Image (cartoon, grey):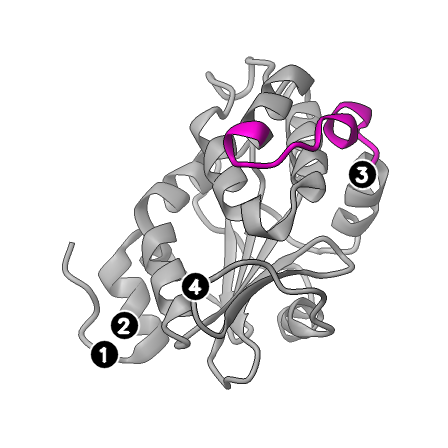
Amino acid sequence: MMKRLVAVAVACAALVMLGVLAFSEPGETAGSVRLTRQLDGSMVLADRSGDAPVLDVYEDFDCPICKEMHSKVDGTIQKLAREGRLKVVFHPVTIFQDEPMRSNSIRAAAAARCVPEENWLAFRDELYAMQPAPHGSASGFTVPELVAAARKAGASVDECVTSQSYAKTHLAETSKIHIQGTPTVLLDGQQLGNEVFDPAALERAVTGGAGVQV
């Protein structure tokens, strides 16, 4: 089984800067916090006027450890962002080279690029809920499944999902990101460890406070 977290190959700080530059049109969130899609396909959940620390989350939708992290701390990550205490940059990547994981990942990530900002977080939840299993041998994230998941998340983007028109763009952007595995999580350019599986520990890392009780 893959290690939970691995070293970032090069230039962590540079990756953070790439993640937070050039906000695009805002999506739907509470208050002044917005979800925005960047030109590289990353999604930023943040108060653009704030000066909160930056959490970069590199995830592969076919990665079971990413699914584990999502189930344990995504609520905490989003809470901190919506409170203006954290800027979160979600980076969907394809880390796997072997089949069927690679094709699973590409189809899911390409579909995610079709989904509008206001539906993207819900679609991300759907992807992790329907992740193909067992990992390493199961094909999944079929086009009909992805169309249905997008509709369940409130987005009617059937043609875009079916055409997989963003697949090549997704792979081109992934090739620019130098990590060795997923999930890879950086807080202001510094790689986090097992605290990304513990809500209280993650909140302490971000805020320096006591953290949440779960």
Task: Give whichever of discs 2 and 1 has the lower sequence position.
Answer: 2
Q: Residue at x 66, y 67 (%)?
A: 19
Task: Give whichever of discs 2 and 3 has the lower sequence position.
Answer: 3
The residue that label 2 is drawn on is 204
Find numbered disc 2 in the image and state the secondary structure of the residue it sits on: helix
| Residue 175 visible in the snapshot | yes
Magenta-span inclusion, residue 191:
no
Label 2–label 1 contact, CB within 8 A: yes
For the residues marked 2 and 1, what is the alpha-carbon distance in whole angstroms? 5 Å
Instruction: Give the extent of the magenta segment.
Output: 151-166
Q: Which of 17 and 190 is in front in this view?
A: 17
How packed mark 1 is, by other alpha carbons closer than 10 Å (few <14, some 14-19, many 20 or more), is few
Left or right of residue 15: residue 124: left
What residue type is disc 4 on? Leu
Q: In which quarter of the image is residue 34?
A: bottom right
Find numbered disc 1 in the image and state the secondary structure of the residue it sits on: loop
The residue that label 3 is drawn on is 166
Residue 96 percent across, percent down from the top left? 65, 33
Label 3–label 1 contact, CB within 8 A: no
Magenta-span inclusion, residue 157:
yes
Q: Quadrant of residue 211?
A: bottom left
**Looking at the figure, which quarter contains the N terminus?**
top left
The residue that label 4 is drawn on is 192
4 vs 2, front mark: 2
What residue type is disc 2 on? Arg
Residue 122 percent across, percent down from the top left? 48, 42
Residue 166 percent across, percent down from the top left? 80, 38
Q: Nearer the viewer, residue 154 or 58?
A: 154
4 vs 1, front mark: 1
How packed mark 3 is, by other alpha carbons closer than 10 Å (few <14, some 14-19, many 20 or more), is many
